[in-house]
Structure formats: C-alpha cells, structure tokens
Amino acid sequence: MNYYLSELFLNRILNSLSDKERLLYTSVCEMEDKIAEKCLTPEAFINQFTNYLPHKDLAEKFDLKLPELIKAVNEIDEKINRKLEEIYQKIQWIDCTKIAYKRMEDKPNTKLFYVNIPYN
C-alpha cells in the first residue's frame, strides 16, 4: 500500500479513537520514535528500553502501572490493525490503462488505476 494512503488511513483511525486512547497511543509512539532517532543500531534501541524503562515513566504520567500501559497500547494497536484491515478489504483498484491509452499512438509503459477508497 502507498505510504501516503497508509498514513491517511492511520490518521483517520486515530481520529476515531477516544481522546484518552489517542493521547496514550500517540504519546507512546512519539516517545519510541524519539528514542529510535537517537539510536544508531537496533541493539542500542533495545538497550534504551531495558536499561531506562521509558515506558514506565510514561505509564506514571498516565497514572497507570507498566503492565496496564502495555496492555492498553496493545489493545489500541489491535483495534487500529483491525480497522486498517477492514479499510484495505474495501478498497477497489480499477485498471483504467486500456481506456486511458485507447486513442494514443505511443502508449507509455505505465499503468493507470482508479482507486475507490471507502469513507467509513
């Protein structure tokens, strides 16, 4: 799937979450992204989480225990993945190449698609 479309769908789903779910999920993602930017290797990334427990600090900000935070984020992640899968199943790709190039003498070596994206 196109990166732009995936981001569009993800933002649509995030906006459909409750305020608490959206804030919790985006806070965890932003924290993990900031740590990932600072780490040069996957090992350094994992080391940050095992030595400094940033999720524990974030859990305290939300007045949760670490297992509660992890469970909540996993549930939100599953909800997002279910909704993304539903959207992907509803998308229709219609090949319009023959129609678009019907009257052209030099036919480009590309395909043209009409993508029907469901709103809900």
Image: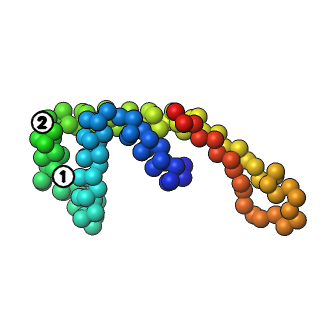
**Observer able to see residue 56:** no
The amino acid beneath tag 2 is Asp
Mark 1 neighbour class, 10 Å CA radius: few under 14, some 14 to 19, many 20 or more:
some
Taking the spot 59% from the left edge, 41% from the top edge, the residue there is: 117
**Observer able to see residue 99:** yes
Height in image: 33 above or below 95? below
N-terminal-most mark, 1 or 2: 1
Question: Does residue 50 appear to the left or right of 6 in the view shown?
Answer: left
Q: Answer yes or no: do the residues labelled 1 and 2 have beta carbons within 8 Å?
A: no
Most foreground residue, 117 or 35: 117
Most foreground residue, 52 or 24: 24
Taking the spot 81% from the left edge, 52% from the top edge, the residue there is: 98
Q: Position of residue 52 (x, y in %)?
A: 12, 53
Q: Position of residue 65 (x, y in %)?
A: 13, 35
To which residue does mark 2 refer?
63
Taking the spot 47% from the left edge, 43% from the top edge, the residue there is: 9
The amino acid beneath tag 1 is Phe
**Picture quarter containing residue 13?**
top left
Height in image: 62 above or below 44? above
Q: Is label 1 in a helix, a strand or a loop?
A: helix
Question: Does residue 66 appear to the left or right of 29 in the view shown?
Answer: left
* Mark number, residue 49: 1
Most foreground residue, 15 or 72: 15
Mark 2 neighbour class, 10 Å CA radius: few under 14, some 14 to 19, many 20 or more:
few
Query: How far is mark 1 from mark 2, CA to CA?
Result: 20 Å
Q: Position of residue 111 (x, y in %)?
A: 72, 56
Q: Is label 2 in a helix, a strand or a loop?
A: loop
Q: Position of residue 80 (x, y in %)?
A: 40, 37
Taking the spot 13% from the left edge, 42% from the top edge, the residue there is: 61
